[in-house]
Amino acid sequence: MPGGGTQLTQGARRALRRAARRAVLALLSGAFVTSGAAVPDLPAALDSPAAPLLPQQELVPGGVALVTLDTPDGRAPRATFGEQRVLVVRVQGKWLAVVGIPLSQAPGHAQLRVHEGTSAADTAVDFEVTDKQYSVQRLTVAPRQVNLSAKDLARVTRERPRILRAIGTFSESAPGTLRLVQPVPGIRSSSYGSRRIFNDEARSPHSGMDIAAATGTPVVAAADGRVLDTGRYFFNGNTVFLDHGAGLVSMYCHLSVIAVKPGEQVKAGALIGKVGSTGRATGPHLHFGVALNATFVDPALFMAPLAPPTDASHDGSG
Ligand code: ZN
């Protein structure tokens, strides 16, 4: 789209300023619950160009929590959510945990554990998760992709640990930014989290963003990273996983072509593959997944908003 790049950049800046303002309001209204009583001086800092570009906070299942950590010394605290390490970034002298909230998270109290280097005990930091009603999406695919044969089921069972291993990767170097580039131009469906009914049978909710694009359209890395794994999976088709550091992992599915190899370093915007419809897909599109602390969250929170939002007739299914 001609001129789209400039608009997106300005849009991204505006979105960040809006997110920072929302964070200020959330903090002032007590939506952030921290282990300290004082209101931290973080929020104004988020508006600073020197601050890492943060995702938008949405305290719902499938969303992202930005939780300020009160740590006495300058060292990065180690934070865990459930069994998983959590991404921690430094913003203007304060540590901030960027927590992926699983779609399966029950609304109510959620608890982060913070482990400090000097202390044997860990502390709990609570945040509140509110309910979100996601839409229902009905899709029609080949029957063999819904009720699997014993052979296909065995294949899916074999593939699952490899996928979980990729999205559960935690490497120590933190990402330089938490804002992601849209990996392919096109209309984004806002179907993240939607309950999927395939051929009248309920299946897992949609864990990523579908972007409609023609077969062969170049797919680029959403941020600097390392190729964790590539493979051809029953549901996801040809897939690339990128590790951006500290538990931020992105996933690109249904590719017609994979253009990278595991271990390669890629820059944001570098070609990693081409759009296709391999695996369980109703047509060519990119399924884009973003994981934090081993859970897929809404990729839109990491990207500049586009207007108007769309549920699009596009119904790529994977
Ligand atoms: Zn999808």
Image (spheres, rainbow, N blue to C red):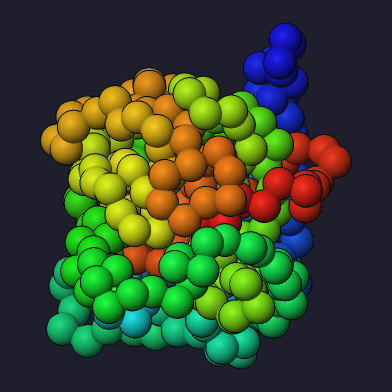
How far across and how far down the image is residue 206, in percent?
56, 65
Q: Residue at left 23%, top 67%?
A: 155
Q: Is residue 207 left or right of residue 8?
A: left
Residue at 30%, 54% (x, y): give it.
233
Measuring from the top left, give residue 185's x and y in whole percent. Answer: 61, 27
Q: Nearer the viewer, residue 11 or 299?
A: 299
Decide if residue 310 is on the left or right side of residue 228. right
Does residue 279 appear left or right of residue 47 in this picture? left
Q: Nearer the viewer, residue 113 or 153?
A: 153
Residue lying farthest top? 2
Residue 247 falls in image quadrant: bottom left
Q: Is residue 95 above or below residue 100?
A: above
Residue 77, placed above or below residue 115: above
x and y percentages locating residue 302 in the rendered image: 56, 46
The residue located at (34%, 82%) in the rendering is: 82
Q: Quarter of the image holding residue 117?
A: bottom left
Task: Please give the count of numbered marks on the rendered protein.
Answer: 0
Q: Which x, y percent locates residue 230?
A: 24, 43
Please indicate whether residue 34 sits to the left or right of residue 3 in the image: left
The image quadrant where one finds the N terminus is top right
Which residue reaches farthest right?
Answer: 308
* Res. 215 in view: yes
The residue sitting at 20% across, 51% down in the picture is 171
Is residue 103 visible in this depiction of the protein? no
